[in-house]
Structure formats: structure tokens, C-alpha cells
Image (tube, helix red, strand yellow):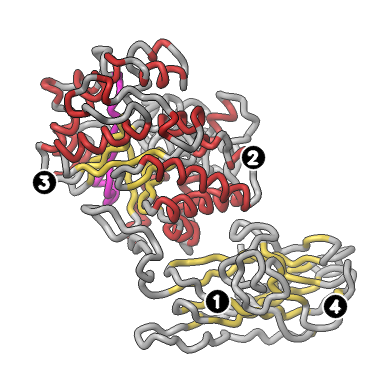
Amino acid sequence: MRRFAIAAVLVASTIVQFPVGIAARAAVAADCVSSTGPGIPPPASIPIGIPGFHAAWYGQSGYPTLCPGDRSTAVVAFYNTGSRGWVNGRLGEVAYLGTWGPEPGQDRASPLGGDGAAGSPATGWPRYNRVAVQPASYVGPGQVAWFQFTVIAPSIPGTYRLSIRPLIEGAQWMEDYGVFWYVTVAGTAPVGSQPALPSRWPSRSLEIGMTDEPNGAAAMRASAPFAFRYQYLSGGVNTGRGWTTWDSNAQFPTTYIQDSARYGMMPVFSYYQLRQSAPGNAMGEPASDFANLANASTMAAFYADLKLFFQKAGAQSATTVLLHVEPDLWGYIQQRYGDDPTRAPVLVGASGAPDLAGLPDDAVGLARAVVKLRDTYAPNVLLAYHLSVFGTNHDPLYEKPADATLDTWATRAATFFNALGTGFDLVFAEFSDADAAYKRVQLGDGGASWWYPEDFVRNVRFIGRFSALSQKRIVMWQIPLGNTKMRAMNDTWDHFQDNKVEWLFDDPGRANLSAYARAGVIAFLFGRGGDGTTCACDAAGDGVTNPAPIGANTRQSLNADDDGGYFRERASAYYATGAMTLP
């Protein structure tokens, strides 16, 4: 895939001398200097004379590093490899560069430039989604068009990507469609550009974590300098199988916290108790949750169980602990009762729990109960709310909404959260609860759960808007571990493919990571959501496996992990290169 420098300009010619670089405007701030890297020369040979309209990338100027607000002019050349000429000013024959995926997406506005419409900055582009028009009146077959245009650095530091593709306006898109340009914005994010990090947050860098069994901290840390390890607390509050029974004297959280701290990782617990408690555990979701929320004895046991956790965690006062509170529950409440949580009946004060007397019997009261118990018994615990996109009764992955619609859904999600009016410190979000190939093979979804570049763009937009409106940072949680690289990934039990790991941590320019960081994401926690999905461990018990490839997954396994060792390799490489500083 070729990267491009951008700008639309000049002449059509059969002789090419490509500029080494286009200088960026001098930085305004004394401590920041903009610069441009070396240009990228054209390929040695390209096809010519293809019938119809066709184009091939033919070199570009270098990637710029800009101070916030600075502008840079860039150039990219395209060779007319077709049999028809490009004619400026004639619809159906004039060549443009249009915006393309993954960032910002086909015909979408970019924060790097535009004409001032559709939220784009005004940098002189022909339109917000047309980066440049052919500079010469005619570009014949075998000639080269030098497209030139201007970009502006956004205010938030990070790596931005602008993808472009040539087209004949009113007729067709042409090749190459893998051309993009990196813009690195230097400096420190301006005050107020991102929600504040939670107090006692362990890092100013974008960090990685994963699910880990008890007593596994030493081995986990030896594979990469992970910052987090997480574990479910589940089994139900009144079933005799809950976490309080997993170790003598309910010491399970204590030993997990101590083991994590010993190896320099923050312990994270996903508290998932309500669904598995009686009497609701005899029902499916979400009926199980609503039955339990309305049962006084169940809710009294729930609050007592939660209180005990806080007492155990609070006794480890020197260690900051993160509690992720009831994944899915908040989404089900919003889904049934709408965006006003006071409409959702929940037994809180009426449960008889002594610590919670007087709290309202609704979803707001539930959130306040969690915060009150934390504040009373474990001030060293950070609380995480769970954001479920389905709470709005919509799912961007399957519905592929327009930006305006997506923004409306994100606003609704934030409205519900803000109406809780509580002291959650941050928010957990998720891509999916299983590998995409697991859902295709085991659940028969026909491939609908596979994420494409446009899906990631929509996800970043949704999360970023929610983060801005809620003023909370985001942790992406329970991220599927499948990949499309290793031979071990042959879409069998425990070895299903997905592409989240490679999208985030096999992107050399880190543009994908940077997009999530700018949207408010501060950590990525990987783990499988159920039996059969891919694990960065040998859950299958089949050792090192290298079955025949089923596609491009041709790499030999690195270890016995069910993903072929790919996740740990990528995590180690990320930290070896240097963890990304958060905006």
C-alpha cells in the first residue's frame, strides 16, 4: 500500500521530476517547528493503455509533522494509464481526488482540509470531499497529473490519516485506492480538549491489558509490559456459586489485587453478578435482569455482595483497583425505559440495605448506591460504567448509519449516562463479545459481524462524541483476539479469526490507535467473551498448531496460544517501539 502526500497542482507531462518535499509553514510557537519528510519516488514501471478511464499512483511529497494550526502543501502524482484523456471542466471526463476510506471514508469530510462545508476546515479544496482537481486542462493517456492541495493540523496532537482516491467526476472511481497521507501533529493537547484522566490513573500513555487467570501475573508481565489484567466476578449473589465462594473467606479479590500489584499492573474486575442471581437466572436476558431488579431479597443480597467486594478491595488501600460495574445492564435499562433513568424501577432504598436507606428506587438510585458503597468502603477503587450501543435500540455495525444519525445515537447514550448524575470515573465500551468468524461459523450471521474500515471510523465517531458529551475517558474492553495472520487461525473452536488486534497494533503509522486516542480512549483490554472464541492462551489444550491456511493466514505459530501468539507479539512490539502518549 502506498502512502501519499497531498495537494493538487501543476501540469500534465510525460516527463516527471518529483519534488523531494514541500516545506510546511513556519511554526508559530517557539518550541514547535513544522517539517516535512522526504518525498516518495514513482514506481519503476506501470501498465498503460488500459481501455477506459484508469489511473496509477506515481509518487508523492513527504509526510509532514506540523504544529497545531499550521498548514502544509503537499503533492501527489497520478499517471493516466487508461485509453481516455481527462478533460478539466467537463463532467464525466474531469479528474478529481476524492476522500476515501478508512479515514475519513468515501465522500466524507476530513478534519485535515476542505472548503468549510460539512464541518471541514477551509483550506482551499474544491469541495469538502474533493481534495483537488486536475491542474491541467487536459491529461492524455501516458501523461501525469500533479495534484496539489493544502492541509491544516488539528489542535489535538496525534497521527492523522487522509485517504484519497482519483475519480472521474460523474462517471467512476479510478485506481489507486490505497493512497493515503499521514499528518503528525506535534505538541501537547490544549487544556480542555479531552476529558481529564481519572484520579489515580496509572499512566499518561495509551496502555494495553488482557484477561488473566489467578496467579498469572508473573507470566503475563513476562510476555509484555502490560498495564492491566482483568477478571470477571460472577456466579450470582445468592446461588452459592458466586465469587465469594471461589476462595476461603472470600479472599479471591484480595489475592488477585496483590498478585497484580506485585508485578506492576492495575487489577480490573468486571462485576457481572445480577444476571446470574436467582430468581432471574432461570430466564433469558434481559428478563433476568429486570426480574432481579424488582426482587427485594435479591437486591439486598446484591448490595451486600457489592459491599463485601469494596471492603476487600478497600483493605488493599495502597493499590488502585478498577471495578467495571454490570456490563450490559445499563444498556438494557435504557433500551426498555428510554433516555431518562428515573423511569426505570429498581429496588434500592426499599431493598432494606442499611447503607442505602433513602436512595430513590430507580436506575439513578442504583448508580448512586454503587458510588456510595465505593466512597464508604473503598476510595481506592475507580468505577467504570458500561456503554452499550444497543441501549439506543440501534447498532451502528449492522445499520451503517449516516454521520448525523450516528451523532444522534451517541448523544442519546450520553444523555442517559449524564442523567445518572453519579461519580463513575470512566466508561468501558466494546467492539463485540466474540470473534467475527465465531459469529459467522457458530451463529450463522453470514459475516455481518466482520468490521471493515468504515465500521471503525463510525465507532471512533460514536465513542468520541459520547466522550466529549459525558466528559469521561474510555476503555475498550473484552476485545476479540482473533487475527487473519497466523496458521493457527483456521476458524475452528478456539481458533476463530477477527481483525481488531491487527487494526490497532499492526498499523505501522499508528493512525488507527491515534484516532481512538483522540476519541478519548486510554486503554485497550483484550479477552474472549465466552467458550470457543479465540484466546491468547492455550484454552484448546492443543499446543502449537499450524493447520493449512484458509486464506492469507500463512504465518507459523509462535507459541501454543490459540491465536498463534500474535497478540502477545503485537503487544510486545508496541511497547518496544514506545507507548503512545495520550492527548
Q: Nearer the viewer, residue 36 or 572?
A: 36
Image marks 2 and 4: residues in contact by CB distance under 8 Å? no
Q: Is residue 555 left or right of residue 525?
A: right
Q: Which residue is mark 2?
A: 399
Q: Which residue is mark 4?
A: 88
Magenta range = 220-236
> Closer to the N terminus: mark 3 or mark 1?
1
Question: Mark 1: which amino acid?
Answer: Ile
Give the image location of residue 217, x and y in percent: 22, 40
* Residue drawn at (68%, 75%) of the image: 125
Does residue 143 show up magenta in the picture?
A: no
Distance Cα–Cα, label 2 vs label 4: 38 Å
Does residue 226 show up magenta in the picture?
A: yes
Q: Which residue is mark 3?
A: 318
3 or 4: mark nearer the eye: 3
Tell me the SS state at disc 4: loop
Query: Can residue 66 be spotted in the picture?
Result: yes
Question: Mark 4: which amino acid?
Answer: Asn
2 or 4: mark nearer the eye: 2
Distance Cα–Cα, label 2 vs label 1: 32 Å
Give the image location of residue 244, x and y in percent: 19, 21
> Closer to the N terminus: mark 2 or mark 1?
1
Residue 152: image tag: 1
> Closer to the N terminus: mark 2 or mark 3?
3
Q: Nearer the viewer, residue 45 or 406?
A: 406
Crowding at label 2, few (<14), some or many (≥20) Cα neighbours within 10 Å?
few
Crowding at label 3, few (<14), some or many (≥20) Cα neighbours within 10 Å?
few
Q: Is residue 91 left or right of residue 460?
A: right
Vertical comparison of 490 with 504: above or below = above
